[in-house]
């Protein structure tokens, strides 16, 4: 298992909610890109816990999988 998968599994087992910075890192996006996606309603489902946006690891994976494309499209 690669490092990203290992860390994702550890997140599921301990705390399934990631901060926006952790979620952006997990997705390979800049924090500002994830923030813009959230503001426009195009990003993964997120929740406001206090004053901090949190992303559930399953929501991140579902959102990412929905954007999968075949290898012929680049």
Image (spheres, rainbow, N blue to C red):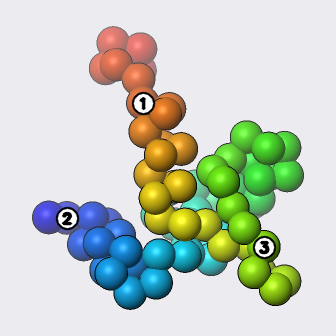
Residue 59 percent coordinates (x, y): 53, 55
Residue 68 found in image quarter: top left
Q: Residue at x 75, y 81 (%)?
A: 49
The label number, if any, that marks residue 2 in the structure image: 2
- Counting residues from the start of the chain, the first of labels 3 and 1 encountered is 3
Front position in the image: 3 or 8: 8
Residue 7 shows in the view: no
Nearest to viewer (mark 2 / mark 1): 1
Residue 19 percent coordinates (x, y): 62, 77
Residue 52 percent coordinates (x, y): 77, 80
What secondary structure is marked by label 1? Answer: loop
Q: Residue furthest left?
A: 1
Inter-mark Cα distance, 2 to 3: 30 Å
What secondary structure is marked by label 2? Answer: loop
User: Dot 1: within a 10 Å radius of its alpha carbon, few (fewer than 14), some, or many (20 or more) residues?
Assistant: few
Q: Residue at x 63, y 59 (%)?
A: 30
Inter-mark Cα distance, 3 to 1: 27 Å
The label number, if any, that marks residue 48 in the structure image: 3
CB under 8 Å between callouts 2 and 1?
no
Inter-mark Cα distance, 2 to 1: 19 Å
User: Dot 2: within a 10 Å radius of its alpha carbon, few (fewer than 14), some, or many (20 or more) residues?
Assistant: few
Q: How many marks?
A: 3
User: Dot 3: within a 10 Å radius of its alpha carbon, few (fewer than 14), some, or many (20 or more) residues?
Assistant: few
- Counting residues from the start of the chain, the first of labels 2 and 1 encountered is 2
The label number, if any, that marks residue 68 in the structure image: 1
59 vs 14, left or right, is right
């Amino acid at each position: 298992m690669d490092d990203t998968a290992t860390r994702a599994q550890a997140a599921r087992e301990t705390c399934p909610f990631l901060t926006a910075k952790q979620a952006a890192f997990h997705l390979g996006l800049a924090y500002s890109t994830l923030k813009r996606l959230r503001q426009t309603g195009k990003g993964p489902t997120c929740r406001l816990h206090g004053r901090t946006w949190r992303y559930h690891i399953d929501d991140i994976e579902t959102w990412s999988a929905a954007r999968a494309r075949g290898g012929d499209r680049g």
